[in-house]
Image: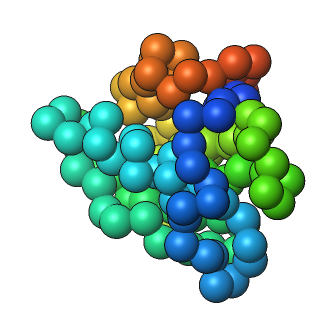
Amino acid sequence: MAHVITFRSSSFDVASEPPNPINPIPGESVLRWLREQLRGSRYETTEPATEDWGWYIDVRGEGASYLVGASGDAAEGAAEPVDWTIQIERHRTLGEKLRGANKMADDDALSSLIERLVRQSAGAADVEVERGA
């Protein structure tokens, strides 16, 4: 089950992002910011990469591995706040899925940290969190 954080922010420069060659959806700037915020923490991240729904990074730490995705809904050339979505999903083996083991808890440490960073450091408004999406 994924955790999904949605918010509005003007803090990320969509215009300076490299184009997503699969689908023109921004998200790289949010993930670069998040990587910088996580630097020096107990989590390691990969470089942002593209997917058809936006951008993603892999995150490892605290004995777990995650896929963290980001996508923005920005009108082309608009300077107004962008609606952002960050999705956090814990990697599980097939065996873990079949046994119902290693599920992402409501109080997952990485998800809680990302939520706190968004609320405190991303110039975010209208923050909403859905656990178990």
25, 128: nearer the viewer: 25
Q: Residue 20, image x and y in percent?
A: 62, 76
33, 10: nearer the viewer: 10
Q: Residue 129, image x and y in percent?
A: 68, 24
Identify the image quadrant of residue 6.
top right
69, 96: nearer the viewer: 69
- Residue 98 position (above or below residue 43): below
- Residue 127 position (above or below residue 93): above
The residue under the point 74% across, 34% down is 81
The residue under the point 82% across, 60% down is 76
Identify the image quadrant of residue 7.
top right
Q: Quadrant of the C terminus?
A: top right
- Residue 39 position (above or below residue 110): below
Q: Residue 116, image x and y in percent?
A: 46, 18
6, 100: nearer the viewer: 6
Residue 95 visible here: no
Looking at the image, residue 88 sits to the left or right of residue 57; the answer is right
The residue under the point 31% across, 35% down is 37
Residue 12 visible here: yes
Residue lying farthest to the left in this orientation: 40
Q: Quadrant of the N terminus?
A: top right
Residue lying farthest to the bottom in this orientation: 21
Identify the image quadrant of residue 40.
top left
The residue under the point 56% across, 43% down is 12
- Residue 57 position (above or below residue 11): below
Q: Residue 114, image x and y in percent?
A: 45, 30
